[in-house]
Amino acid sequence: MLSSSVGSSVLTLSGRSLLTADSALTIANKLDAEISEGRKHTNVVVRVCGTYIGRFGIRRDSKAGHDYIPRQIHVTMKEALGLARCSLYRADYERILKDRGKLSGGSAPKV
């Protein structure tokens, strides 16, 4: 798939977002995130080993893009797509967070 970089978002040549609502839900489930239904969004809170990592909302509008999610969970667009497309797993995500100093090396108590 060809893509072009526009600002901080990665778009396909058609200008559509790479991360869809389905991709966002796949990422949330893969990361064992806390998911709750809000009025306009599905709210997602990501914790790893009890440590708060970030939160994002999944928009209900099927045409809405979700390209803001990578920066909310401290990954690149490529890594977020890997999580959505099953080429990266939760263990890979934890390693990425540790490498970036977002998660300590030891296990934190679960909250």
Image (cartoon, rainbow, N blue to C red):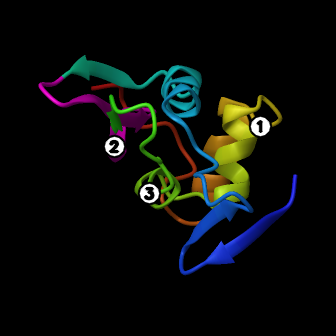
Q: Which residue is drawn at 50% across and 36% down?
A: 107
Crowd around label 3: few <14 · some 14–19 · many ≥20 (10 Å): some
Q: Which residue lies furthest to the left in this view?
A: 39
Q: Which mark is residue 99?
A: none
Look at the numbered disc 3 and give the secondary structure of its residue. loop
Question: Which is nearer the N-term, disc 1 or disc 3?
Answer: 3
Q: Residue at x 47, y 48 (%)?
A: 65
Tell how many labels.
Answer: 3
Q: In this view, does 89 lie above or below 54?
A: above
Residue sitting at x 86%, y 60% = 2
Residue 73 position in % (x across, y down): 46, 51
46 lies left or right of 98 = left
User: In the displayed structure, would residue 32 be above or below residue 47?
Assistant: above
| Mark carried by residue 56 | 2
What main secondary structure does the magenta stretch of the protein show?
strand
**Magenta stretch: residue 53 in it?**
yes
Label 1 Cα crowd, 10 Å radius (few <14 / some 14-19 / many 20+):
some
Q: Residue under label 3, please give it.
A: 68
Question: Mark 1 — residue?
Answer: 88
Q: Nearer the viewer, residue 102 or 10?
A: 10
Q: Quadrant of the C terminus?
A: top left
* Front of the two marks 1 and 3: 3
Identify which residue, 61 or 8, lies in the foreground.
Answer: 61
What is the spatial separation of the Cα atoms under label 2 and label 3, in whole angstroms?
8 Å
Q: What is the distance, in whole Å, between disc 1 and disc 2 at their CAs?
A: 19 Å
In magenta, the rendered stretch is 38-57
Quick one: label 1 or label 2, which is nearer the N terminus?
A: 2
**Amino acid type, residue under disc 1 in the picture:** Leu
